[in-house]
Amino acid sequence: MPRARVLIRPKAGILDPQGQAVERALPQLGFTGAANVHVGRLIELDVEDIAEVAGMCERLLANPLIEEYEVIELASASAGEPSA
Amino acid sequence: MPRARVLIRPKAGILDPQGQAVERALPQLGFTGAANVHVGRLIELDVEDIAEVAGMCERLLANPLIEEYEVIELASASAGEPSA
């Protein structure tokens, strides 16, 4: 059973207030030089058919109006992925 | 300037209500067979030194008590990463 990793990000041009907040907070903690910070969501799941994941994103996982998604197939879930 | 991708997930054993909600909603949309669904956060940023990212996670990006993080170095930001 394949394991899928879905990366969901704000589309280019869409406001990313969480990313802006992180970018402003980092220098106050002494981390200088961070730029282009974007905050999105990470979803990982076992699926029977990796091709179904795009449909899941369109209909549930992401908001296609304002978010883009990327589906990455990981090694099979039986190959050591913790099931907790 | 390296670009870092940070994956933040609930630690094993920590309640993941968002993952549970997704896992329950998928069958109602006709997607059967999804399992072990976990929802976390995705943070991507340009940094001067990739080694600093773990410290950023400990102090700002993640909550180390309940979340685990994974830092992945991507291709350099100058190699085509959109800066929007």
Image (cartoon, coloured by chain):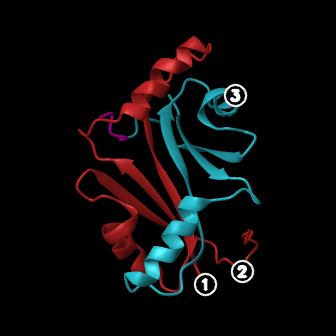
Chain colours: A cyan, B red
| Residue position marked by numbered label 1 in the rendering | B1
Query: Which residue is painted at 32% across and 39% down in the image?
Result: A82
| Residue position marked by numbered label 2 in the rendering | B78
Q: Quadrant of residue A34?
A: bottom right
Q: Say if the magenta span includes residue B14.
A: no
Query: Which residue is painted at 64% across and 38% down in the image?
Result: A62
Label 3 to label 1, Cα distance in Å?
Answer: 35 Å
- Residue B73 visible within the image: no
Q: Is residue B11 left or right of residue A43?
A: left
Label 2 to label 3, Cα distance in Å?
Answer: 32 Å
Q: Secondary structure at mark 2?
A: loop
Pointers 2 and 3 within a single chain: no
Q: Which residues are magenta?
A: A80-84
Q: Is residue A54 left or right of residue A28?
A: right
CB-based contact (under 8 Å), mark 2 and mark 3: no
CB-based contact (under 8 Å), mark 1 and mark 2: yes
Position of residue A49 relative to residue B48, above or below, is above
Q: Main secondary structure of the magenta part?
A: loop
Q: Say if the magenta span includes residue A81.
A: yes
Pointers 1 and 2 within a single chain: yes
Residue B21 place in picture, x, y as percent: 44, 25
Residue A7 place in picture, x, y as percent: 59, 48
Of the residues shown, which amino acid type is indicated by label 3? Gly
From the viewer's side, name the closer residue of A29 and A73.
Answer: A29
Q: Is residue A73 left or right of residue B8?
A: right
Chain bearing tag 1 is B
| Residue position marked by numbered label 3 in the rendering | A55
Q: Secondary structure at mark 1?
A: loop
